[in-house]
Amino acid sequence: MEHIRTTKVEQVKLLDRFSTSNKSLTGTLYLTATHLLFIDSHQKETWILHHHIASVEKLALTTSGCPLVIQCKNFRTVHFIVPRERDCHDIYNSLLQLSKQAKYEDLYAFSYNPKQNDSERLQGWQLIDLAEEYKRMGVPNSHWQLSDANRDYKICETYPRELYVPRIASKPIIVGSSKFRSKGRFPVLSYYHQDKEAAICRCSQPLSGFSARCLEDEHLLQAISKANPVNRYMYVMDTRPKLNAMANRAAGKGYENEDNYSNIRFQFVGIENIHVMRSSLQKLLEVNGTKGLSVNDFYSGLESSGWLRHIKAVMDAAIFLAKVLIEKDWISFGHKFSERCGQLDGDPKEVSPVFTQFLECVWHLTEQFPQAFEFSEAFLLQIHEHIHSCQFGNFLGNCQKEREELKLKEKTYSLWPFLLEDQKKYLNPLYSSESHRFTVLEPNTVSFNFKFWRNMYHQFDRTLHPRQSVFNIIMNMNEQNKQLEKDIKDLESKIKQRKNKQTDGILTKELLHSVHPESPNLKTSLCFKEQTLLPVNDALRTIEGSSPADNRYSEYAEEFSKSEPAVVSLEYGVARMTC
Amino acid sequence: MEFAELIKTPRVDNVVLHRPFYPAVEGTLCLTGHHLILSSRQDNTEELWLLHSNIDAIDKRFVGSLGTIIIKCKDFRIIQLDIPGMEECLNIASSIEVFLCLFSRIQVLQALSTLDSITLMYPFFYRPMFEVIEDGWHSFLPEQEFELYSSATSEWRLSYVNKEFAVCPSYPPIVTVPKSIDDEALRKVATFRHGGRFPVLSYYHKKNGMVIMRSGQPLTGTNGRRCKEDEKLINATLRAGKRGYIIDTRSLNVAQQTRAKGGGFEQEAHYPQWRRIHKSIERYHILQESLIKLVEACNDQTHNMDRWLSKLEASNWLTHIKEILTTACLAAQCIDREGASILIHGTEGTDSTLQVTSLAQIILEPRSRTIRGFEALIEREWLQAGHPFQQRCAQSAYCNTKQKWEAPVFLLFLDCVWQILRQFPCSFEFNENFLIMLFEHAYASQFGTFLGNNESERCKLKLQQKTMSLWSWVNQPSELSKFTNPLFEANNLVIWPSVAPQSLPLWEGIFLRWNRSSKYLDEAYEEMVNIIEYNKELQAKVNILRRQLAELETEDGMQESP
């Protein structure tokens, strides 16, 4: 709280981001320990979690006040005008401090209390068990075993304790290999395809420089190759553009020398590094924030940002890694969450949207295979939300070791049980449970299949969205169908009872009368339409960006039933009348 | 003219048909006067029936004695036929080329007059295999359409001034005009408007009595000619003290240039009660080239991301979409928000004008979002209003010889409707397939509906007597079910689409239709339909059971009460 000087400012204007006529709402701005809150004159609340703030900018003073532009990591952009410069300055300074905490312990997750007891909390953390995941894949088996080499994080700090390696790879080989790999990240099993006995392993670049080699590393790769008996060759995919890999040699890093590794084929797939990705996304957001954007500017911006090109590159590379399991592939294996997502105040160069890209790739798959995923787009958006919200412990820290040191499991809560509890919201109503239809997806990566993900990058710019959501309607209908099935069963059994009663009734009329004292009366049963109206979506206050109950996907009914849904949408691009 | 003379080789065996995403089919190729048919003569195998008039361009290649003909269709599909035998292949190709000339480049063929060659087209030979329940030629009569709003206003009347097509050759015999303006005045106004297209009623907004009128450009010329009757006509539609808007679909610059050729725009001095707004909707070859570029970009699967995006951008297709939609929204806004009547025109008043007037109605008028209402809209605002379908749709994206009058004006309109449909997926009674079907039939059809350039030509061709109307076929329940949107729930609102580039995607259903498999998307759509159908079933069942239970309860009550 020591950062907050001003807690409330009145007569603040919230500008419509896309309005060419500078339309605005007037209201009051509040600053709390965790959120920035704006309540407009219609009592509509906009909550912004401090952790979500990516940048705060104070623009030059205008006649109406001091402009404050806040950009959030979940792609919300708000533009306030604060009447007095001093208030604006106070808020600006506070937000700068609050949005970039220097210590993990200051993050929201450590103060967030969802009223769970300790055992519930523990259960939450145990929802996803890596050993179970590997067991499902059929590991350990005759080729692969659990290695305890990294039990105390001695070999590799950024790897988890439990690692799966080829059975024939001895500990000295592992240790030797790890010394030859950047940050000790030696090759370990990532995914095992039981039917084909094929494995996906991953590791970091070798510290080869221009000529160095490492016999243990060569042995380990050989062992991996032997653990895939069905395949004659093993492929090593280097995700970088070859040029980058070559340049790294000067820094004592580099790539494997083909001459030293037999039966192995090397392939570069050209995914750009985090710095390129970061500026690519920045460019994309810049273009899309333009008022009165023309189609040509939109597409040339999309092209020059290179964003979709990068997405396609990742998809092309990952096409055989279609099975997507976030917990395993990303969190346990040291994706540098806190640095890449800028949770703490650190080196801005280390921030990158790699995980956002992963989610986008998954979204593209859901677009091509609408029935193959049990979850919906809302699920992906919600996960993205919480990568940055720092509300749950899952995405804090950079590796398992760091997470253990932070005692996340004792001090914070896991996101997954909250998503699970709300899973109805995230289920894909069209999901086909006949999973055999979609064992391996074969996505089409022709360029025209890649589209701009509006619902991610403009998730808060509702004027750009369709006004009616098919997804929502079908989801509600699925729910309703379940209810109706139940109703039918109830009614049938009631009718049966009645009929039995009638046949018996002639004889034992009096008896029956006492058994069924009160029957539902005629009137209510005819008001069927009203009865089966769906439960209205929680009209609860939504704290945008921090509540797992965020109901931005259910606003359609409310928005559409307004008598004048037009004003806002027209403002963007249409309504200017010039002679 | 005998078709048989044109067909040197009517039949070839062992021809192999290649289509994207389908296995190759071997069979017998037959050429008839109107169709190219490939049949494998086996059960369960789909036959290919292609109308000659659907062929936009062909290429031929030879490898040894094996010839290959690549047929590019007006619906953007590309198919390949491998024909054994050089001579057979050449004969087939040359016959197709002759038909192509005959049915597409009608006006190039000197031997026949335009109208004569139209009578050789398939609709004049087509005999329907279905029983006509309702004759589509009489489904949307102007008198009936007029009745829809005559209850709300008495300020308008039907005029038969054009019944011989003498006043305006591109107008229908019956038009709606202000009641206070007599036919004599209309004749005078016609001489002041391009193509005789004097201002007529396009749409009456019942909510506030405002109207959309459309016309051709005023023929002011360089010396600023004026026409008192014209001014009186459009002023007659204004309420006392109210101003109206004139939306000129051309930029001010373009409008000014037309003065040299005798055209022009309404001068403020002569139309003080009207405010003029210029938009710039492109026409003619610019649109045709845009389509050609877009289809070319979509057909090349090898483009890398940058190239694809820059090709998509360079086609400018979506820029045209945005411009048209924006103008339509503006028109709708004048009517519904500003409470002002509008007059819309470009140069001829047969292209961009109709795009805007019809889209504004989609936005404003719930009826035009139903199947019947949309058909009526096309009948009224496109066919009757004199959009020259025959000229505009003569060729499509693969044509080599570009003619000035060819332009995908109607396709752009359908694309705009699709954009709105996508943003309001529950507000339309029809689905995407309905729009695709209309696109196909505008370019090649067994029905007479889209033949000819205006009502006058259609009368001369005796289309009503000699051909079948598209609506007679579409409006059969069995066909309608394919075009019905299962999500439709009627709403009476004005629907305002977003015109931001982020909200206007490429219409994949049309442009990527033949370039990718839609299997998974189709299955997902099926599943959605199933869920909705199941819901209806359950609702009905619950209703029946409730009633049954209620009856039992009353019976019980009666038994118990005495």
Image: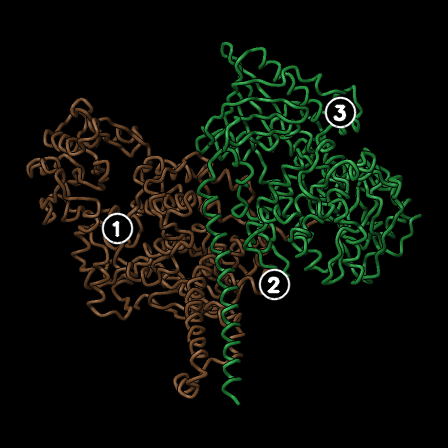
Determine which residue is flagged by label 3: B107
Indicate the quadrant containing the N terminus of chain B: top left, top right, bottom left or bottom right. top right
Chain with colour green in the figure: B
Chain A color in figure: brown
Task: Kindly identify the residue that appears in the image at 51 percent across and 10 percent down.
Answer: B65
Q: The disc labelled 2 sits on which kind of residue? A: Glu
- Mark 2: secondary structure: loop
Q: Is there CB contact under 8 Å for labels 1 and 2?
A: no
Left or right: residue A460 versus residue A155 is: right
Which labelled disc corresponds to residue A564?
2
Q: Residue furthest right?
A: B184
Nearer to us of marks 3 and 2 is 3
**Disc 3/disc 1 C-alpha distance (Å):** 67 Å
Q: The disc labelled 1 sits on which kind of residue? A: Glu
Q: Vertically, is B379 above or below A429?
A: above
Task: Kindly identify the residue that appears in the image at 66 percent across and 23 percent down.
Answer: B401
Q: Chain of mark 3?
A: B
Q: Chain of mark 2?
A: A
Q: Position of residue B486 (x, y in %)?
A: 55, 53
